[in-house]
Image (spheres, rainbow, N blue to C red):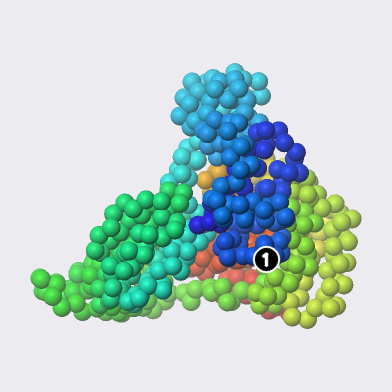
Amino acid sequence: MLNKSFTDLLNEMAVLLELNQDNVFRIRAYQTAAQAVAALTSDIASLTREQLLEVSGIGKGIADKIEEFVKTGHVKEHDDLKEKFPAGLLDLLNVSGLGPKRARLLYDELKIDSFDKLKKAAAAGRLQKIPGFGEKIEQNILKGLHLAEQARSRMLLWEARRLVNDVLLQLRGVPGLLEIEPAGSLRRGKETVGDLDILCASRNPDALIERFTHLPSVERVLAAGATKSSVLLSGGVQCDLRVVAAGSFGAALQYFTGSKEHNVALRERALRMGYTVNEYGLYRVSDKKQAKPVAGKTEQDIYKKLGLSFIPPELRENRGEIAAAEKNRLPELLEESDVKGCFHNHTDLSDGTSSLEDMADAAEKKGWEWYAVGDHSQSLKVAGGMAPAAVRKKIEKIRALNKKRRVCRLLSASEVDILADGRMDYADDLLAEIDVVTGSIHSGFHQSEEQITGRLVKAMENPHVDCIAHLSGRLLGRREPYAFNTDKVLQVAERTGTALEINGQPDRQDLTDINALAAKKRGIPMAVSTDAHSTEQLNYMSIAVTVARRAWLEKSDILNTKTYPELLEWLKD
């Protein structure tokens, strides 16, 4: 909880400094630090100053602010900056298409400092009258408003996992606890999550509820009953704790995991077999008082009694999983332990915060067999894109490092921009020197569907392009996908053998599970990637693997499961 709050503070500091027209390097330092803290798997309050300074992106100034925040819950410089601007002005910066300069201009010209005022002004056509705005920008802001309002009620999967893990960690030590698991859309691995649901069985429910309602992260207790308690955590996130009998834990876990559609289909199947299923257990229909459950202690028991193999939570969306389970044809889903390396990531040679050597060492610590060291190409200047000479220098450095390394082999990689006309950002002779070329679109998002489809097709037809990254270009809660013909792109990927990436960045998760499943059915190779910008962000592989599991993907569908010699053979082919 503390990490999330401090990450939000750092991001807000960067925005406030930009509104204040501060030094661009100072602004970037706060943005970089926010990335670093967001990816940490350890609580900042548990880290010593020395440990904090070892984290790439955290310098002495940020470490000072972390210590101040842990002690007081505030940072004075942040409080002072906030006093300079109306509170609602910061909310506007969550709207796609509104940067600090435009938001400041809207406030100065029209006194707009809230979503409501912005919506009314845009709907009335008042924005396009301001210099630098136009009808198209006004319409894009209206779309961005809708997206931002939706995002307010949900959080990203990575954030939800961190919050619930923090709660679980503090509850697992309560005497009498028998079992505890998160449920709901978080357990199914949905890309965004609303409220948090936790299910438990305990011999001492009162002690558990007492601990839960008095956690340090609890802002307000909404309800505290004998079997269910609800609280608001820091940041306004609702978390519900349900306590059930040990004999009903499996039934309750299945029921509260969902999805609603899966549960409806399961109930219909149960009725056809003479059973009824609910959160208390599986009963014979003839047992009107539901006095003697047939199953309920474990989820496996429920599915087995209904003639089904166990259905992993990620598949419970009523997309054919029940029929497959009946025939024992469910896929053997990808596990993170199957992953042997990562294609797409960044170092401090472009917009990453960790050095090439540190990223390689972190990959080796994860037990990976190989690691493709990537960075942005030259046209993406805002991300420190590398000039051709710098790329060749990096390739030589990787070759030299490989002579010393034996556990985790390094490959040269580059995330190469697909330009507005479909050409790649580097010439073919340089692309041929790079081991793994990942093509991606970072500009021209408002081109027509035909234009963007054409760009993607042209890139995939380039024999040097191995993979297409974050296919739709979306940023969850901030940017809609650009328009492209999905079916045509998948057809060309199948024909050319170009891999498609499942990006583990929490706000990308792109390919989506739906498109990844469509790619699997065509036999298109896929890669799970972290798109890491720091050593800590290599942990985003868990998000990419979750998307892959929701897409029914197996080890054989994923390039990252190849050994180093197998990968070299695939790249050669």
For badge 1, the amino acid type reads Gln
- Figure label count: 1
Helix, strand or loop status at disc 1: helix
Relative depth, front residue between 486 and 370: 370
Q: Quadrant of residue 411?
A: bottom right
Indicate left or right for 572 with 225 as reference.
right
Tell me residue 90's x, y (percent).
Answer: 56, 36
Q: Residue under circle 1?
A: 51
- Please give the name of the residue rendered at 62% of the width and 55% of the height, measured from the top-left corner: 67
Tell me residue 334's x, y (percent).
Answer: 53, 73
Q: Quadrant of residue 447?
A: top right
Task: Tell me if I can see residue 452 in this picture.
Answer: yes
Indicate left or right for 547 with 131 as reference.
left
- Please give the name of the residue rendered at 66% of the width and 31% of the height, measured from the top-left corner: 101
Look at the picture and state if 25 lies above or below 277.
above
Task: Tell me if I can see residue 550 in this picture.
Answer: no
Tell me residue 538's x, y (percent).
Answer: 64, 65
- Please give the name of the residue rendered at 56% of the width and 73% of the height, measured from the top-left corner: 336
Relative depth, front residue between 150 and 323: 150
Quarter the C terminus occupies: bottom right
- Please give the name of the residue rendered at 59% of the width and 76% of the height, measured from the top-left corner: 338
Residue found farthest to the front: 71
Q: Residues within 10 Å of mark 1 (few under 14, many from 20)?
A: few
Look at the picture and state if 567 lies above or below 481.
below
Indicate left or right for 444 with 331 as reference.
right
Relative depth, front residue between 115 and 339: 115
Tell me residue 515's x, y (percent).
Answer: 52, 57
Indicate left or right for 331 with 38 as reference.
left
